Image (spheres, helix red, strand yellow):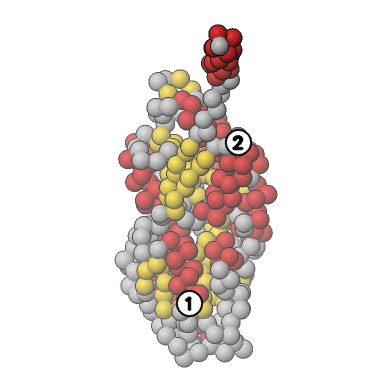
């Protein structure tokens, strides 16, 4: 009996020693919220990164306004916004802002018999449709641009975002640049006083609404048009050329980006020059606090974004986004090293 007791004690001690000598690996969990514009590629990156590292990154697509509110309130580890904050505002809020990926906003429509890219619109006509000045699909302003297309005598249903949206900010920033009447009466914003139309939540909501309602037109990040098989329009660019949304036309617009001189990475890529440039292009941004409270968690968060820059380019292209160039990613890493701190100590080295 004593022999068995001794064996039991020895096993208990051995188990205790083993437990203390093997480190416990607790998987880090990170949370983010904001723009729906980049949600398709963020979902792919987060899934792949979790498979490789065990780190779980959760992101809620609630719109850019919601993302900014939540990161300012400290309820998430990072926020997402397609509407960049100007440098002084970023610093005033105690935040760091940096671009993650570039994409295109595209007008999408549901007109019986029309396929993707068949309908041509000029900037002025697009603004006229979304301002309610053009109300029917067979009005001369549209038919004169599209000889040979059978456009119906059907009212146009405008679909816009219901909540504060960076996609709306990019879209209205473009209309504000190309239409004097839009500039005077409506302007640019994550929320604007839409003269006509119905609201839908998020890029998915707009895409689904347009897909269901005959005679409708809306605007979404290009990936949502492709995923939902919603026809896009062909749009006249600054050079007077009608172009289709594509990785090539988004890259052509992004080629003019001067990130080095952008204060706080504030940069707007709408209505860029070039024969091949898609006119409604924008970067989507991450917002994090400059002063972090948890060094380990902050480092894991930056490791995730670093991995996205290093290994996420091919996945981004597959989802119809333009990756951030390597030289810009290097600039961002230097910003992390210079500005993100825990108790005065740099997180990224």
User: In this orientation, which residue lies closer to the viewer: 151 or 198?
Assistant: 198
Label drawn at residue 53: 2
Q: Identify the mark nearer the N-term, 2 or 1.
A: 2
Figure quadrant of residue 239: bottom right
- Image location (x, y in percent) of residue 158: 41, 75
| Vertical position of residue 302 compared to residue 212: above or below | above
Between marks 2 and 1, how big is the CA–CA gap?
Answer: 40 Å
Q: Residue at x 58, y 71 (%)?
A: 229
Given residues 53 and 288, the one toward you in this image is: 53
Instruction: Check the picture and name the quadrant holding the N terminus.
Output: top right
Which quadrant would the C terminus be assigned to in this image? top right
Q: Nearer the viewer, residue 232 or 274?
A: 232
SS label for mark 2? helix
Kindly identify which residue carries mark 1: 212
The number of discs equals: 2
Residue at 52% across, 61% down: 221
- Residue 41 is left or right of residue 219, and the answer is right
Mark 2 Cα shell of 10 Å, populated few (<14), some (14-19), many (≥20) = few
* Image-based side of 122 in relation to 159, left or right: right
Residue at horizontal 39 percent and vertical 67 percent from the top: 200
Which of discs 2 and 1 lies nearer the camera? The answer is 2
Q: Which residue is at 49% across, 56% downward? A: 37
């Amino acid at each position: 009996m004593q022999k068995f007791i001794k064996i039991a004690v020895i096993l208990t001690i051995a188990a205790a020693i083993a437990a203390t000598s093997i480190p416990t690996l607790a998987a880090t969990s990170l949370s983010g919220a904001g723009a729906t514009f980049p949600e398709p590629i963020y979902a792919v990156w987060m899934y792949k990164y979790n498979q490789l590292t065990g780190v779980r990154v959760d992101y809620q697509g609630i719109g850019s306004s919601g993302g900014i509110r939540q990161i300012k309130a400290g309820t998430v580890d990072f926020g997402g916004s397609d509407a960049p904050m100007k440098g002084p505002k970023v610093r005033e809020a105690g935040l760091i802002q940096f671009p993650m990926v570039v994409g295109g906003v595209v007008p999408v429509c549901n007109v019986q018999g029309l396929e993707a890219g068949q309908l041509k619109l000029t900037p002025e006509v697009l603004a006229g449709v979304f301002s309610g000045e053009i109300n029917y699909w067979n009005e001369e302003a549209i038919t004169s641009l599209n000889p040979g297309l059978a456009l119906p005598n059907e009212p146009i249903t405008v679909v816009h975002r219901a909540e504060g949206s960076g996609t709306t900010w990019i879209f209205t920033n473009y209309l504000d640049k190309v239409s004097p009447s839009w500039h005077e009466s409506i302007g640019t914003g994550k929320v604007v006083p839409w003269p006509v139309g119905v609201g839908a939540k998020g890029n998915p909501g707009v895409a689904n609404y347009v897909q269901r309602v005959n005679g409708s037109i809306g605007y979404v990040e290009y990936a949502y048009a492709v995923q939902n098989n919603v026809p896009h329009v062909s749009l006249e660019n600054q050079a007077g050329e009608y172009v289709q949304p594509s990785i090539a036309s988004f890259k052509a617009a992004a080629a003019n980006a001067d990130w080095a001189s952008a204060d706080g990475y504030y940069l707007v890529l709408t209505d860029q020059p070039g024969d091949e440039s898609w006119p409604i292009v924008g970067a989507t941004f991450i917002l994090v606090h400059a002063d972090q409270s948890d060094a380990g968690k902050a480092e894991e968060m930056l490791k995730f974004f670093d991995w996205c820059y290093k290994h996420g380019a091919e996945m981004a292209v597959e989802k119809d986004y333009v990756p951030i160039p390597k030289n810009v990613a290097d600039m961002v890493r230097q910003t992390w090293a210079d500005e993100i701190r825990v108790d005065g100590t740099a997180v990224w080295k």
